[in-house]
Image (cartoon, rainbow, N blue to C red):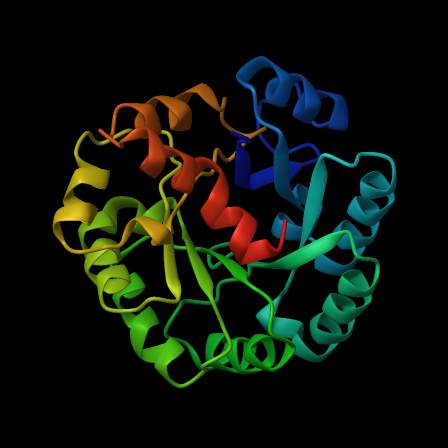
């Protein structure tokens, strides 16, 4: 069984952290048996999407175990749309990433709606930073955009109950539970809410967070061996064509 991490990062963060080089990504992957990792550029997330995506593209050339998310900034959507298509043309980017906090674009905003329209047209999965009750808006947004599939990064954060109910009502909304606070029972709640096993994904937030936290949450969730393979490998492989 492979392990595919759908929520990683490359590059230094503007915090008191030592890491940032691609060697750290690989070191942590080797330590925990992670075979493949989908990453976004920290620079692209927090500062300059286009420049950060370009820097990541150079890294991906020499590291076959990493694949990229092209960060989309809804505030500069035309430029981001062109950049996304350029990144996808390399074959090393498999999806898009949108952070809601850094660009100041909430899930329910007109800017996010326009970004969703663009991504529905392009037809690639979106990893969306979700933190708060507005994660409940996603099923309605996806209903209008039939090609778009969204990974709820952090599974709503502190609104994991709302995220579970949203995913249970929409088969194109996936839950990925990485965060620093482990909140025992999140995955059990989502399963009881009716989220199919096919809509759970494994992510770590590495290198910002050590992967051992998310691995512990997944391994303590009571999955059967077959379900565990779905969550750690097969769901991501099918979603991203790996």
Please, is residue 186 above or below residue 193 in the view?
above
Residue 125 image position (x, y, % from top left):
55, 63
| Residue 181 visible | no
Name the residue nearer the viewer: 240 or 216.
240
Name of the residue lying farthest toward the left: 192
Residue at point 49%, 24% (across, down): 211
Residue 50 image position (x, y, % from top left):
77, 60
Residue at point 60%, 74% (across, down): 123
Residue at point 24%, 30% (across, down): 221
Residue 144 image position (x, y, % from top left):
40, 86
User: Horizontally, is 14 left or right of 192 in the view?
Assistant: right
User: Horizontally, is 168 left or right of 30 in the view?
Assistant: left
Name of the residue lying farthest toward the front: 226
Please, is residue 144 above or below residue 239 in the view?
below
Q: Please identify the quarter of the rendering in which residue 136 is found.
A: bottom left
Name of the residue lying farthest toward the bottom: 144
Residue at point 61%, 82% (across, down): 121
User: Horizontally, is 101 left or right of 53 in the view?
Assistant: left
User: Horizontally, is 221 left or right of 66 in the view?
Assistant: left
Q: Please identify the quarter of the rendering in which residue 154 is found.
A: top left
Residue 150 image position (x, y, % from top left):
45, 63
| Residue 41 visible | yes
């Amino acid at each position: 069984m492979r392990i595919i991490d759908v929520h990683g990062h490359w590059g230094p963060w503007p915090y008191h952290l030592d890491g940032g080089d691609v060697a750290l990504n690989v070191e942590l992957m080797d330590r925990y048996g992670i075979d493949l990792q989908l990453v976004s550029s920290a620079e692209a997330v927090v500062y300059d999407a286009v420049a950060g995506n370009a820097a990541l593209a150079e890294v991906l050339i020499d590291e076959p175990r990493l694949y990229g998310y092209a960060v989309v900034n809804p505030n500069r959507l035309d430029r981001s749309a062109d950049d996304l298509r350029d990144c996808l043309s390399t074959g090393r980017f498999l999806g898009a990433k949108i952070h809601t906090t850094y660009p100041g674009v909430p899930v329910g905003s007109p800017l996010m709606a326009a970004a969703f329209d663009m991504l529905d047209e392009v037809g690639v999965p979106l990893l969306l930073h979700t933190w708060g009750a507005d994660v409940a808006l996603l099923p309605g947004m996806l209903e209008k955009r039939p090609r778009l599939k969204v990974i709820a990064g952090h599974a709503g954060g502190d609104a994991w109950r709302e995220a579970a109910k949203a995913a249970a009502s929409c088969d194109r909304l996936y839950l990925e539970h990485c965060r620093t606070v482990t909140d025992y029972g999140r995955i059990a709640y989502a399963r009881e809410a009716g989220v199919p096993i096919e809509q759970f994904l494994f992510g770590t937030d590495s290198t910002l967070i050590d992967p051992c936290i998310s691995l512990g949450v997944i391994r303590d969730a009571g999955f059967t061996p077959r379900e565990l393979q779905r969550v750690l490998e097969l769901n991501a492989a099918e979603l991203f064509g790996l």
